[in-house]
Amino acid sequence: MAEEILIVKGLSKFFGGLRAVDGLDFSLAEGRIQAVIGPNGAGKTTLFNLLTGFILPSEGSFFFIGKKLNGLKPHQIVSLGIGRTFQNLEIFSNMSVLENVMVGRHCRTRAGILSSGLRFPRMRKEEKAIRDRAMEELIFLGLERRVSRPAGSLPLGEQKLLEIARALATDPKLLLLDEPAGGLNIRETARLGEIIHRIRERGITIMLVEHDMSLVMEISDEVMVMNFGKKIAEGPPRLIQRNPQVIAAYLGEEVNHA
Amino acid sequence: MVMAIFIAAFPPLTGMNNYWVGILIFVGIHSMTTMGLSLLMGYAGQISLGHAAFYGIGAYSSGVLTTKFGIHPIGAFGFGILLSAAIAFLVGKPTLRLKGHYMAVATLGFGEIVFIFFNQLSSLTGGPSGLSDIPSLRIAGHPLEGKAYLYLVWAFVFLFLIFSLNLINSRMGRALRALHSSERAAGAMGVDASLCKLQVFILSAIYASMAGSLYAHYVTFISPSSFGLMFSILLLMMVVVGGTESIWGAMLGTAMLTLLPEYLRGLEDFEMLVYGAILTFSLLFMPHGVLEGARKLLIREEKEKAKDG
């Protein structure tokens, strides 16, 4: 069994009376692809927002490579190695495709105002390294022909890939993908599945929220099912498909607890 | 193209009389301040209503330290920079952590406080009647006057411009533009929003302070009325009229609003009326600034030419 990269203990987020995430416990082994599924409003995106510091937990804690991350800000968490994409695209539409990915290197580089304004030699060297690395990620995702296009002018499918390229540029150990296949056609989704496998081959652990079940079943090692903020099932995809509680959560059937 | 407009707007440098030299010095000094404001507004998305105060801090640092304490102008210049940076840090630190326009309100209040200090600290600043006999800058005993001062000011403008353009095309500049587009995504890339905004605010305060020092040594007499809210608003207007999205826009707006009153002087009683009308129309028809407006016009013309041909 590989080492556990992420351990979540009793994690909860309450919005007023709403228990968006309610006492969640789980752990994630290094190098795995874990899917998080569940009906709309199950708390999947809230979970991602908790893990990346965009919202603070009401209760509970989570540990990443043995380090407690509660209360850290997003920019601190990404520098520790958790990268993410967003459900509703959040690309920097006023910048070029290459520049978008270059921003991803922010947490791994240092140049400040003075050295940037005066173009110190060290800054120029760093700038070149940023550019080269951003180029590599664009090639990795097959966007190399879009380099100088304004990011906002790309079709949706490519904007989704651009978000992944940008997140990869942050050198994540764990990558959180929030509905990466949302809005993609069948061909694009198939390509995405292949890309996710190649990301894992780079040694990056992946957690994804996804509604496209065929993609989830095809690529994930493990599936966690959430409903009303709670984990209702966990296991390999084949078993999850047959789990009566999961079927009930999706189809709205009454579960027989007897 | 921008350079062409600049050259066209200015009478030729050779055979220029002192009147025009003076105006061009002011265009330069104002540009130094508006470049910083442009970085703050166009890139960091923050509005400052207190930049006249930083300009004033630079001017009074130079004025007071050279006349009352006999400190060398370069030392006074440096003191102004440090003081402005420190004050910008104190004002910016708590306000830039908040989202929204707290910055505008905080700087408005700060500007007023500084204005009151200039008026009330009469033993140092001379109070409302001002501070006179500020020494001119000298190089090897020769005072820098007229065209020599023009070159000095524009050398600073040039350096600020290079620095700012470098900054925009760097890690910090990209972080700022990213923040402007999506603060959430920028955070997920490791950009510390409040730190970035604070740094730019401090930089813009330093720009303003340096401009203020150059102003004090040029006019040799300063009084609080030059550093009030109206001047802060005028600086903002220069950036907005030119276009907040680029440094060039800020420079163009600064040149326009500094030169316009000179061109309109002949209208006498109607001067302010026409001035106001020009500002209103430029904002109505070119909401993204004159620079962007002119660019769009040019593109349209080219398209029409292409159609005809």
Image (spheres, grey):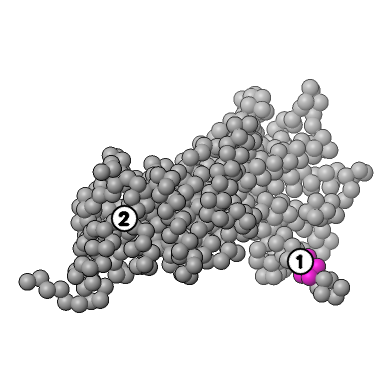
In the rendered image, which quarter is residue A45 located in?
Answer: bottom left
Above/below status of A42 relative to B186: below
Relative placement, left or right, of B79 versus B261 is left
Residue farthest to the top, as pictured: B140
For mark 2, give the secondary structure.
loop
Q: Quadrant of the N terminus of chain B?
A: bottom right
Relative placement, left or right, of A87 versus A28 is right
In the rendered image, which quarter is residue B216 located in?
Answer: top right
Q: What residue is at 19 percent from the left and 69 percent from the top?
A: A245
Q: Quadrant of the C terminus of chain B?
A: bottom right
Determine if the magenta segment contains residue B202.
Answer: no
Mark 2, mark 1: which one is toward the viewer?
Answer: 2
Residue type at numbered disc 1:
Ile
- Name the one closer to the observer, A216 or B275: A216
In the rendered image, which quarter is residue B81 located in?
Answer: top right
Q: For the residue carrying disc 2, how many other residues have a C-alpha within 10 Å: few (<14), some (14-19), or many (20+)? A: some
Q: What residue is at 62 percent from the left and 46 percent from the top?
A: B168
Indicate which disc residue A221 carries: 2
Segment tinted magenta in the rendering: B298-303
Read off the chain for label 2: A
| Residue A12 in the image, given as x and y percentages of width and height | 23, 56
Q: Main secondary structure of the magenta part?
A: helix
Relative placement, left or right, of B309 versus A87 is right
Q: CA distance from mark 2 to mark 1?
A: 54 Å
Residue B33 seen in the figure: no
Residue annotated with mark 1: B299
For mark 1, give the secondary structure.
helix
